[in-house]
Amino acid sequence: MSRRSDLDDLYDLLDCLEANVGGKRRLRDCTGYMNWPERGVYFFFTEETRDSTGQLRLTRVGTHAVSSGSGTSLWNRLRTHRGANRGSYEGGGNHRGSVFRKHVGRAMIERDGLHDEYPHWGEGSSADRERRLAELDHEHRVSEYIRDLPFLWVAVDDEPGPQSDRAYIERNAIALASNYRKETIDPQSDSWLGRNSPHEKITDSGLWNVYHVEEACDPAFLDRLAGAVSETTAP
């Protein structure tokens, strides 16, 4: 089977998933009180559409708890991407705890020439209160962007670890959707924010991912994903 055919199969599965959960969500409308599965894989989309089908283009795939013993839940990871709804950093967030936020924020800095305003963006795994407050306006911009992206999730409740089904699905979905050093399918538009990223793997893959974008896909993951989709219901 060709990569194009496998990619069509992936999008068909995502359509089935969307039907099962009652539609795509946006993080601006989500809370921890929803009945989220403990573990899963998430799929974010941009408002751009695939040329061949009109489906929204997949733009990030992610999961959580892929280190043995990790206790991070699906909602905890999504909430970190969403950012804070209250407290000192209300409306912002912590990009040092979310590589998704870090990549989006860096692309905005490049696009808007904000290097002098945010010279330490992405440095380190933590920052003191003074630096976080200095970066808060930009964290707001990142939150506004990510909270408005449509997304889906699939429940895959296996044990944490690099050999988990979640890691397998994530890795191969990224590899399949990525255009990095491959035939370009569903090309990202010139206006897509990721085009401004300093990471070649983001600008060329069409995804907010840098890991696995250069890999070949194992099409057998689609069967594993199909089984998980059939068991996933609305929160």
Image: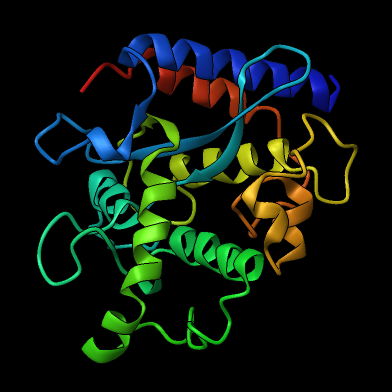
Q: Is residue 133 visible?
A: yes
Q: Residue at x 29, y 41 (%)?
A: 39
Instruction: Give how far across and how far down residue 157 sits, in percent.
Output: 30, 36
Give 34 or 138, whichever is nearer the viewer: 138
Q: Is residue 128 visible?
A: no
Q: Quadrant of residue 83?
A: bottom left
Quarter of the figure that contains the C terminus: top left
Give 156 or 204, whichever is nearer the viewer: 204
117 on left or right of 199: left
Could you tell me how many numbered marks the image carries?
0
Instruction: Give how far across and how far down residue 34 sits, in percent.
Output: 14, 31
Instruction: Give how far across and how far down residue 202 sits, in percent.
Output: 69, 56
Instruction: Give how far across and how far down residue 124 sits, in percent.
Output: 43, 87
Q: Residue at x 15, y 29 (%)?
A: 35
Q: Residue at x 39, y 82 (%)?
A: 125
What is the basis of the colouring in this image? Answer: rainbow
Q: Is residue 196 above or below residue 180?
A: below
Give 216 or 183, whichever is nearer the viewer: 183
Q: Is residue 174 above or below residue 214?
A: above
Q: Residue at x 20, y 69 (%)?
A: 89
107 on left or right of 3: left
Quarter of the figure that contains the N terminus: top right
188 on left or right of 60: right
